[in-house]
Amino acid sequence: ADIISTVEFNHTGELLATGDKGGRVVIFQREQESKNQPHRRGEYNVYSTFQSHEPEFDYLKSLEIEEKINKIRWLPQQNAAYFLLSTNDKTVKLWKVSERDKRPEGYNLKDEEGRLRDPSMITVLRVPVLRPMDLMVEATPRRVFANAHTYHINSISVNSDYETYMSADDLRINLWNFEITNQSFNIVDIKPANMEELTEVITAAEFHPHHCNTFVYSSSKGTIRLCDMRTAALCDRHAKFFEEPEDPSNRSFFSEIISSISDVKFSHSGRYIMTRDYLTVKVWDLNMENRPIETYQVHDYLRSKLCSLYENDCIFDKFECVWNGSDSVIMTGSYNNFFRMFDRNTKRDVTLEASRENSKPRAVLKPRKVCVGGKRRKDEISVDSLDFSKKILHTAWHPSENIIAVAATNNLYIFQDKVN
């Protein structure tokens, strides 16, 4: 139940939220800098924990709805409270997280325990006062957006107008207003009239960071569609269609499975889209639809292992990908608790490992190498000894600093740049 299923920094990077398989949301807050312990800056400690979703049962379809949190998205902070969206397979909730450090005392109609007093006994008028108390962080559900998805929700994305957001499932994308919970607009519907003709599903969707009318969604066929909500109410006709022509020499039984896109992310600048499929990360320029401008091999050494990865279902794992704050480095996960970073400017890449054995606090991470066949050097690990049950699917990057959060099964690792 404590397997982490999503990780997300808020817009300032002061808070980090994780969701898990048991429907819980844990929020970490960054420690403020202190004079006597300058190296403590950047440590994140638990700020608030709450149960976001409970397991449910759909009686009409005889289906269990699991409580696992699929995605968390923060809203920009407007006042002292924080707001975030969390979703499981069916229901999106808007949570308010706020602090209380005072409590009212001295009511007229109630005694200290909160019981009502007999009005005939009240002879003096008291003015209630606010007394200080220990800091309490409360999470309250402000909105529940339910009953709009027939299929499982895979993405939510807050629009840059901060008034609306979208939720995407396998076949449809809905647009919501934050104030209205009982209706949503269906903006994409790829469900065929006859379900036997179904050839692809929606795998991820995201709004453009600056243009509130533009969004993209990716499909299991390895294509990305960019839609403009100004053209029509139902965005079934895309404005742009990104697809890389397949190399016939690489065609195999697994081609379709490994070309399915598991994550799509706009760069902070809004100029590029990054997509992750099973073996690669690709960066697309919004102005060029016929091929990506950059392709990075995440774990090409698995190409010969696809057969066994298909048998143990790992080939269907959905890896996410993230940009750093300046869009110059991208990060994504792999197996054996490895995660990869690619520097777009220098074209250098590195493999790092998030595991208990090698991450003592403030220890420097050593780059790892995987060798394929032939002689193995002593610090390399062979493909055959990789542990496919240890996978890093979810990562997050601080919006402005080099601090990353990496979820490895039920452990959350936070790494930061080496400071002298």
Image (spheres, rainbow, N blue to C red):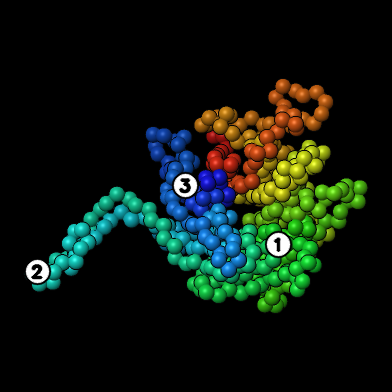
Q: Residues within 10 Å of mark 1 (few under 14, many from 20)?
A: many
Residue under circle 2? 121
In percent of the image, x 61 and y 47: which residue is there?
394
Residue under circle 3? 28
Measure the alpha-carbon separation of dots 2 and 1.
Answer: 66 Å
* Number of the front mark, 2 or 3: 2
* Number of the front mark, 1 or 3: 1
In percent of the image, x 54 and y 72: which residue is there?
177
**Pointer 1 or 3: first along the chain:** 3
Residue 294 percent location from the top left of the image: 77, 49
Q: Are marks 2 and 3 in contact (CB under 8 Å)?
A: no
**Pointer 2 or 3: first along the chain:** 3
From the viewer's side, name the closer residue of 194 and 357.
194
Which quarter of the figure is the C terminus placed in? top right
Measure the alpha-carbon separation of dots 2 and 3.
Answer: 48 Å
The residue under label 2 is which amino acid type?
Answer: Met
Report whether residue 48 is seen: yes
In percent of the image, x 74 and y 60: which residue is there?
219
Which quadrant would residue 185 be assigned to in this image? bottom right
